[in-house]
Amino acid sequence: MSPILEPFTLGDLTLKNRVVMAPLTRSRSSDEGVPPDFAVDYYAQRANAGLIISEATNISPQAVGYALTPGIWTDAQVEGWKPVTAAVHANDGRIFLQLWHTGRISHPDVQPNGQSPVAPSALKPEGMAFTKSGMKPHETPRALEADEIPGIVEDYRKAAENAKRAGFDGVEIHSANNYLLEQFVRDSTNKRTDQYGGSIENRLRFPLAVVKAVTDVWGGKRVGIRLSPATTEPGKTPLDSDPKATFGAYIDALNGFDLLYVHTIEGVTQQTRDVPDEVDFGQIRKRFEGAYIGNNQYTLELAEKDLAEGRADLFSFGRPYIANPDLVERLRTGAPLAEAPKAYWYGGGANGYSDWPGMNGPVAFRR
């Protein structure tokens, strides 16, 4: 038995193994941000993971950056998530909701009334936005006024409360991949001169206010956070000028909230595990007082090696879970992994989403 596949205690949660299903944006929700009925099957089939982190879920209409992504700000969205969490629990799984605000990685076509996306500063990102009418170049965002920021903090608080109503076991704050919170953290995207910009302390002010609001709802031991100090995607954003100092200070401040875990993208999402010299994941692991989840192109062998060397406690798998609902059993038996063509990743219906077979046919689950 691989130690990765043995039970693990995470805070007050007993997990079946150290395998985490990473958040996977699949763009199957309605225009109103309600997850589809077949999302129940999709998540229940994958409840073999020790912990599921849901697809990134918008905290407000302003937070939306991609068409057909789910939300957690309306009663209808909460009701849409309830059968998902119930099915995961019926299959002895655990599931956290990832709280998301995309900031400037958005487009007026997916914003309320066609308004401009918001950001710490009016800096246009490179890259394309996914809208209902296809891919479109990102546009220059509007810099948030200082008096708007407390309202977004309250959006996070309400989203955390709604996640509890929907039956989730906890929440993960998305502070990675160059979305709004990380846009404030990095000095490459935050050029503000007020209390939310300039010094590291100022750049962390808004993200830490979000962490406080969310932990006020859940308590630290049911809250995790996702970071990506080395990631340039989406939008090809430059790194912070001093990632070691910035993210070291971030981790030290996060320790004050007694968070359950930090979930770190090691390298550049979907591209490489190579890490630039100015980023130190070992520092994050050593300084953070909770559990550490490693992510990005893990195999069972690499996870076993990193566990043995004390580099991480849990390991999240993303793309392998798309076409392998029985991923844990495949890892256990050494069976080959199926590959999902990229055409199935985003958009569409149940096909290529909740209809992937296991090694021995359809994956049995309780609904």
Image (tube, helix red, strand yellow):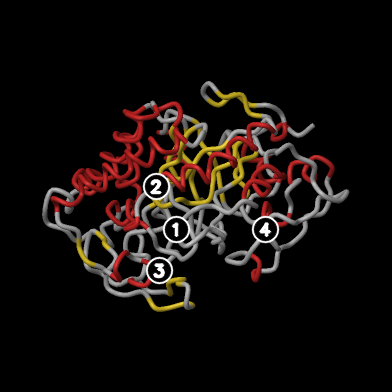
**Nearer the N terminus, badge 3 or badge 1?**
1
| Above or below for 287 versus 205 | above
Image disc number at residue 32: 1
Image disc number at residue 259: none
Which residue is nearer to you in this view: 165 or 297? 165
Residue tagged 4? 353
* Residue shown at 64% from the left, 56% from the top: 319
Residue tagged 2? 74
Measured in 3D between alpha carbons, the distance from the residue under mark 2 to the one under mark 4, in whole angstroms, is 24 Å
Query: For the residue carrying disc 1, how many other residues have a C-alpha within 10 Å: few (<14), some (14-19), or many (20+)?
Result: some
Quadrant position of the N terminus in the picture: top right
**Nearer the N terminus, badge 1 or badge 4?**
1
Residue tagged 3? 235
- Which residue reaches farthest top? 12
Q: Which is more foreground, mark 2 or mark 3?
A: 2
**Nearer the N terminus, badge 4 or badge 3?**
3
Task: Name the residue type under label 4.
Answer: Tyr
**Nearer the N terminus, badge 2 or badge 4?**
2
Residue 207 screen position, x and y as percent: 29, 44
Q: Can residue 308 be seen in this snapshot?
A: no
Measured in 3D between alpha carbons, the distance from the residue under mark 2 to the one under mark 3, in whole angstroms, is 29 Å
Query: For the residue carrying disc 2, how many other residues have a C-alpha within 10 Å: few (<14), some (14-19), or many (20+)?
Result: some
Please give left or right for residue 23 compared with residue 238 in the image. Answer: right
Task: Name the residue type under label 3.
Answer: Gly
Task: Name the residue type under label 2.
Answer: Thr
**Badge 1 element:** loop
| Above or below for 241 versus 311 | below
Instruction: Report if the CB atoms under discs 1 and 2 are less than 8 Å apart.
Output: yes
